[in-house]
Image (tube, coloured by chain):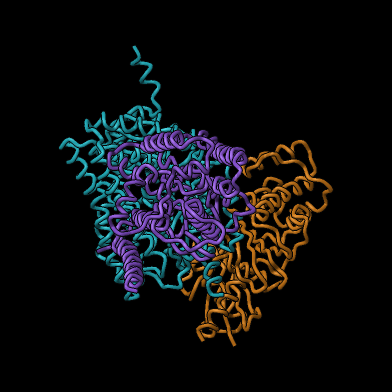
């Protein structure tokens, strides 16, 4: 029988239940404290923070309202489908009546747990997710009936294996080269397979009607998302950290309700634009962050530094899959037939994506174009190139991005960090020096 | 007339400089120890005495350095990189690259003729690119730290140190001594290793002449020689390089005092 | 006298109606992904009507050299041909997308197909590229056969008309079966008909006899109609008029000539591929080319790509150097 061999081949070693409970308790408490602390700091930096932000503060607590809601919906029979990366087709999940949630881990403390089974040189997001699984910390991962993991990078490839010991994992194979017709065809087949898996899990058929509704729901979300980002183009009426929080909550919140709340927030902000009621001084150096995702709450380390240091900066836009890239691209449907809708969905998720996991024989300039366009539209003064140590893809693209930005005469600083709070002092020095540089240029 | 003061809260020492109309009139330093704020106060008082001034005469105090938040009487702060840029251009108007090798870290900054910071790079991860490396190696060689420089200049070639990390370098040095390699050659190798770390950091920034070296280590002739050789460029060193940070901060303070007037 | 005034009045009312219709569509059409298409259908309908009017109803001035039906046909064809040629040199294949009645027919078939929820079939890329090359071969074949067959006929004018064979608007070909009906209708309404009389045409133009030609014409017509339920705008991909016009955009010698083209702003393009997907004639240059003039030789200027591009200011219609229409964030459908 396989049982003895099976026990020995799991990645995560057996841990005493008391140890698990203790760690889970302490890390959860610490995480809630970090969440509250971050919110306090955001409120402190923005004296007249609108009331509409309170909703997002509430949803930002993983262990609060949203967890309860999903639990209740699960009891009522709905299925929860988690995903690790924004390549997963949300519209298909919504059409089948399931709940989509992102499971990416942003806890620094669980990265130390992940160190027990893999070297520290590996991407901290992976280590953190594994560590969270070791103590069953992530509410969304625990509640998922299935997890969609697109194998974008090596870390995620192995993460899927580690998690497959505990959860039903649906693998997706995004091609590394996405602008070839045959690789795109491969991806479309992957979407077809996932569609069937979703239908089987939920027991609901994805019909033309419910898929159309799902696409329209997401298009409304994109509309609200773009509306919020457009408001960041002028003098700051919303601080970077707050906008980043709003953006990220879309990954685990009920998307219809999120859309409505974002629209309410934008209504408020538009009034403030007229009244010239800004969240930071208009002359504040405008910073763009690009690089590896910054997942709430612990990864607010760097944005906190940027927006609280002396001189202060404001994050006006970011090129990260945890921020301004989440909902920016809509599904463009030509004819509302089933095949065209599924085709449009498949294309939307990878073709416009600027993730460095892709390459191309035609120059691979998608990310460069994205960054250049945002710099011009948002009048960015300087770019922070944020990389967590272990990410080969983002680290390697730095050399080219730097040359592009040098040619545009935009200062860029390579900020590499880890999932640790201990280097805050060092980070602070570097961020402050960079902001001083930007301030001097703004003066001139 | 503008009188300003700069306080550089280094990891090992606190340095203070007082400037009158951008001319240095007093300098003082103290070991930081366990109570850096107290050390800062003491150094400040000492400098004031030397300048024959009182606190009220100072129009603006700017702090810099690692312990920048521990100076309660500072009016403002500036980053070490900003201070270095200002100081470099102040000492040598032709300076465009300033390298600051401190006790525990090193940095290089790019500046223009007005001392405005344009780019910077930091090496805070490898201790072999900073001053404490010399201290540790001097111990291993059983030589006084002050003599390491002149000792290394006596060598024609450097021994080979294989370890890429300072922790292993120490045991490497010990085994070289046992093999009876001349101490001068070992010393030269040590300085070369340090200079390699620093120069690779500078190259990431891009080397623009003229290059200025500041920080405590700049006084060490052995290190300077190695750095010149490995960078392949001549290096300018101010008279008292350890005060560069404090002078830079004081220059920034003067500018801010003038603005408030 | 009154006739003249009533005629002028008729023209004024007609022009006014067209303008009003255009403005109505532009202002009241809410859905940004349909606006341009709706306007285009409207213009196509107007253009078709106008073309019929020009070809059938407008009286012609006198001519010192030639008389009779041959002449009237020749002149009408020449007028239309010159109009098409000039508009193409200036505007690129604008005629194809906005003024050609056959394209209107194809578009209406497409809309019928959409209403019946029949899925369209995209030619695989290799086939698409191969057929692109084939088009030019086809055109060469038509011209060569026209030249070869025409020489066999002694009459010079007929030779000229025959040479214009591939370029004459094909609606004339389709008018033939219903021509007697049209003539009768015109007669009852009091309009004098200077008809097209295909029989006479066939005698002058072709080596074959008229009946065979009509049969071939109908077969081709039905074949392409059926094909349109699977492949979008099947005729437009092979239309000889279209291929000739596309030469303007294909060869660099002419490519700078048209003052209207589709322009792409490089940094705004995310390579999302929507433009390539919605193009009814499967143009790939609008996606492949990175910046500047991305108009392909096959492009019929329907501007569906510009309409569906979700990034503001990425794909633009440039007219004489100015951007007259930009792609919009169509999620923002204008609020009531």
Residue A234 x, y percent position in the rendering? 41, 68
Q: Is residue A217 left or right of residue B161?
A: left
Chain B image colour: orange
> Residue at 38% across / 25% down in the picture?
A10
Residue B25 x, y percent position in the rendering? 65, 80
Residue A169 x, y percent position in the rendering? 35, 30
Which image quadrant is residue C220 in? top left
Question: Is residue A352 visible to the viewer in this orientation of the structure?
Answer: no
Which image quadrant is residue C222 in? top left
Q: Give whichever of C3, C291 is nearer the camera.
A: C3
> Residue at 51% across / 35% down in the picture?
C208
**Chain painted cyan:** A
Q: Is residue C199 left or right of residue A52?
A: right
Q: Residue furthest right?
A: B156
Question: Is residue A240 visible to the viewer in this orientation of the structure?
Answer: yes
Q: Give whichever of C85, B18 is nearer the camera.
A: C85
Q: Give whichever of A27, A194 is nearer the camera.
A: A194
Q: Is residue A172 left or right of residue A218?
A: right
**Chain painted purple:** C
> Residue at 67% across / 72% down in the picture?
B113
> Residue at 62% across / 41% down in the picture?
C151
Residue A125 x, y percent position in the rendering? 42, 42
């Amino acid at each position: 029988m396989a049982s003895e061999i099976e026990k020995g081949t799991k990645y995560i070693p057996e841990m005493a239940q008391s140890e698990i409970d203790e760690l889970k308790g302490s890390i959860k408490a610490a995480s809630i404290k970090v969440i509250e602390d971050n919110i306090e700091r955001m409120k402190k930096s923005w004296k007249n923070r609108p009331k509409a932000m309170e909703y997002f503060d509430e949803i930002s607590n993983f262990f609060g309202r949203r967890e309860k809601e999903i639990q209740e919906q699960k009891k009522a029979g709905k299925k929860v489908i988690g995903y690790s990366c924004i390549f997963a087709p949300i519209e298909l999940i919504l059409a089948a009546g399931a709940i989509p949630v992102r499971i990416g881990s942003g806890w620094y403390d669980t990265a130390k747990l992940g160190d027990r089974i893999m070297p520290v040189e590996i991407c901290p997001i992976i280590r953190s997710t594994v560590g969270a699984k070791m103590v069953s910390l992530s509410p969304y991962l625990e509640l998922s009936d299935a997890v969609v993991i697109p194998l974008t990078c090596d870390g995620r490839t192995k993460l899927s294996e580690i998690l497959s010991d505990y959860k039903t994992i649906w693998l997706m194979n995004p091609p590394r080269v996405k602008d070839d017709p045959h690789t795109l065809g491969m991806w479309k087949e992957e979407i077809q397979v996932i569609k069937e898996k979703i239908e089987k899990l939920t027991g609901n058929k994805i019909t033309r009607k419910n898929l159309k509704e799902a696409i329209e729901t997401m298009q409304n979300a994109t509309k609200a998302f773009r509306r919020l980002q457009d408001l960041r183009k002028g003098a700051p009426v919303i601080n970077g950290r707050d906008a980043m929080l709003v953006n990220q909550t879309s990954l685990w919140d009920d998307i219809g309700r999120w859309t409505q709340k974002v629209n309410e927030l934008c209504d408020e902000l538009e009034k403030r634009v007229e009244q010239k009621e800004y969240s930071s001084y208009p002359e504040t150096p405008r910073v763009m962050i690009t690089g590896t995702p910054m997942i709430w709450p612990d990864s607010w380390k760097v944005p906190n530094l940027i927006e609280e240091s002396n001189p202060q900066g404001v994050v006006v836009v970011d090129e990260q899959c945890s921020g301004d890239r989440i909902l920016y691209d809509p599904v463009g449907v030509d004819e509302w037939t089933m095949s065209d809708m599924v085709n449009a969905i498949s294309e939307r998720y990878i073709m416009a994506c600027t993730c460095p996991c892709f390459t191309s024989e035609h120059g691979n300039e998608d990310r460069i174009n994205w960054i250049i366009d945002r710099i011009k539209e948002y009048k960015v003064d300087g770019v922070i190139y944020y990389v967590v140590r272990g990410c080969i893809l983002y680290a390697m693209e730095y050399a080219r991005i730097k040359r592009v930005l040098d040619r545009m005469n935009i200062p860029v600083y390579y900020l590499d960090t880890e999932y640790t709070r201990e280097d805050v002092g060092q980070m602070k020095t570097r961020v402050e020096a960079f902001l001083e540089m930007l301030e001097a240029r703004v003066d001139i | 007339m503008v009188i300003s003061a700069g306080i550089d809260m280094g990891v090992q020492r606190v340095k203070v400089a007082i400037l009158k109309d951008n001319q240095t009139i007093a300098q003082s330093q103290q070991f930081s120890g366990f109570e850096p704020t107290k050390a800062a106060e003491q150094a400040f008082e000492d400098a004031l005495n030397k300048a024959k001034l009182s606190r009220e005469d100072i129009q603006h105090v700017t702090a810099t350095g690692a312990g920048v938040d521990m100076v309660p009487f500072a009016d403002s702060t500036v980053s070490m990189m900003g201070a270095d840029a200002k100081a470099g251009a102040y000492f040598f108007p032709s300076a465009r690259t300033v390298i600051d090798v401190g006790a525990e870290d090193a940095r290089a900054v790019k500046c223009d003729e007005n001392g405005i910071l344009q780019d910077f790079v930091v090496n805070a991860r490898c201790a072999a690119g900073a001053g404490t490396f010399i201290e540790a190696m001097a111990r291993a060689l059983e030589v006084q730290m002050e003599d390491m420089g002149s000792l290394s200049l006596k060598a024609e070639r450097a021994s080979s140190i294989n370890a890429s990390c300072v922790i292993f370098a120490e045991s490497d040095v010990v085994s070289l001594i046992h093999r009876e390699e001349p101490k001068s050659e070992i010393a030269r190798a040590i300085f070369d290793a340090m200079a390699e770390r620093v120069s690779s950091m500078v190259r990431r920034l891009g080397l623009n002449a003229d290059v200025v070296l500041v920080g405590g280590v700049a006084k060490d002739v052995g290190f300077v020689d190695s750095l010149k050789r490995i960078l392949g460029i001549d290096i300018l060193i101010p008279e008292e390089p350890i005060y560069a940070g404090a002078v830079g901060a004081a220059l920034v303070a003067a500018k801010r005092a003038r603005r408030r007037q | 006298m009154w006739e003249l005034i009533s005629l002028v009045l008729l023209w004024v009312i007609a022009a006014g109606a067209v303008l009003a219709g255009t403005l109505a569509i532009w202002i009241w059409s809410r859905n940004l992904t349909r606006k341009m298409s709706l306007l285009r259908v409207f213009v196509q309908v107007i253009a078709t009507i106008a073309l019929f009017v020009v070809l059938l109803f407008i009286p012609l001035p006198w001519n010192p050299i030639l008389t009779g039906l041959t002449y009237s046909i020749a002149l009408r064809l020449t007028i239309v041909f010159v109009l098409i040629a000039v508009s193409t040199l200036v505007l690129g294949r604008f005629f194809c997308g906005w003024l050609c009645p056959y394209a209107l027919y194809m578009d209406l078939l497409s809309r019928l197909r959409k209403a019946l929820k029949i899925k369209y079939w995209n030619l695989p890329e290799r086939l698409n590229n191969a057929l692109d090359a084939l088009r030019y071969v086809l055109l060469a074949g038509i011209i060569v056969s026209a030249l070869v067959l025409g020489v066999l006929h002694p009459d010079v004018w007929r030779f000229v008309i025959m040479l214009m064979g591939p370029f004459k608007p094909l609606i004339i070909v389709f008018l033939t079966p219903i021509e007697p009906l049209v003539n009768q209708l015109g007669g009852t309404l009091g309009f004098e008909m200077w008809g097209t009389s295909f029989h006479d045409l066939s005698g002058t133009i072709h080596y074959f006899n008229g009946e065979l030609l009509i049969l071939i014409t109908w077969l081709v017509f039905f074949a392409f109609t059926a094909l349109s339920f699977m492949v979008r705008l099947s005729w437009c991909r092979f239309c000889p008029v279209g291929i000739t016009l596309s030469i303007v955009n294909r060869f660099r010698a002419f490519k700078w000539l048209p003052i209207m083209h589709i322009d792409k702003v490089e940094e705004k393009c995310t390579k999302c591929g929507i433009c390539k997907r919605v193009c009814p004639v499967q143009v790939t240059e609008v996606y492949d080319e990175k910046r500047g003039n991305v108009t392909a030789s096959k492009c019929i200027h329907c501007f569906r790509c510009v309409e569906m591009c979700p990034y503001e200011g990425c794909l633009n219609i440039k007219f004489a150097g100015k951007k007259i229409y930009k792609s919009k964030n169509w999620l923002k459908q204008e609020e009531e």
